[in-house]
Image: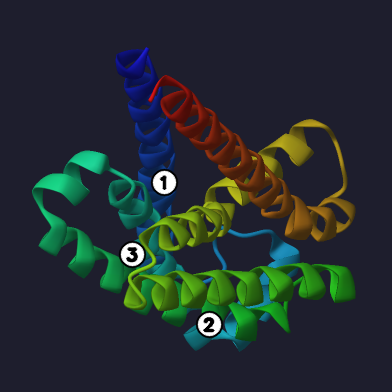
Amino acid sequence: MNRMSDAIRSLGLGTILVLSLGVVAYAVVAYSLFALGTVVHPDMRAGFEANRVAIYTHIFASAVALPLGPIQFSVRLRTARPGLHRWLGRTYLGVGVLVGGAAGFVMAFHAFGGRVSQLGFGCLAIAWLYTGARAYLAIRAREVASHRRWMVRNFALTFAAVTLRLWLPASVAAGVPFGLAYPAIAWLCWVPNVLFAEVLLGRTAGHARAALAQSQAQS
């Protein structure tokens, strides 16, 4: 059973890593080789042009966070290379989350779609920064279990970069007008991720309690 669980876990992390790398590759190509705003909806181009520094900062800082997140959940890495795990974690939180989140918060004020989009992306940026800070403070206090829980929540928010790019083509395929879809996606790209993370954390905690109760009953 443990081997099966480990295999499922590895498959899940592998899928998340592949999706994350796909978005990173797209972002690097799109924002390095093409003029800013070329690959976004025409209605968003003016906003992009007016916030070039924040856009580029957010995109490339997030491109650091996306691939590092899944790697940090590797039990093998934490066990075999704890020093590397710590340095990658500092890079993830210090460059990806702190820099990317601050730039994302600035961008949120100018998000296409009005107040609904601005509030959605603003809350995402705040939650990303907050959960990153909680994860950092927990590990500084040597509260490893709490650190891991906050990191799960934090990466669920990081993964919004992926889910946003899944929702956008889905809305186009469904024929939903962009002006109507984008404000909803400003919330859909991250709220379900957080809810899923909480369910996952709840199940993990439940299994841990059941295993402890079984161990105590046998002793």
Q: Position of residue 36 (x, y in %)?
A: 50, 72
Local crowd at mark 1 within 10 Å, few (<14), some, or many (≥20)? many
Considering depth in this image, is 46 or 168 the residue closer to the camera? 168
The span from disc 2 to disc 3 (Cα, nearest Å) is 14 Å
Q: Position of residue 10 (x, y in %)?
A: 33, 28
Q: Does residue 84 show up?
A: yes
Seen at 66% across and 40% down, the residue is 199
Which badge, 2 or 3, comes first in the chain's sequence?
3
Local crowd at mark 3 within 10 Å, few (<14), some, or many (≥20)? some
In the rendered image of this protein, does residue 210 appear above or below residue 154?
A: above
The span from disc 1 to disc 2 (Cα, nearest Å) is 20 Å
Q: Say left or right for 149 vs 60.
A: right
Local crowd at mark 2 within 10 Å, few (<14), some, or many (≥20)? many
Please give the residue where the numbered disc 2 appears in the rendered image.
Answer: 103
Please give the residue where the numbered disc 1 appears in the rendered image.
Answer: 20
Q: Does residue 33 show up?
A: no
Asked if the residue under mark 2 is in contact with the one under mark 1, i.e. CB atoms within 8 Å, the reply is no
State the SS at label 1: helix
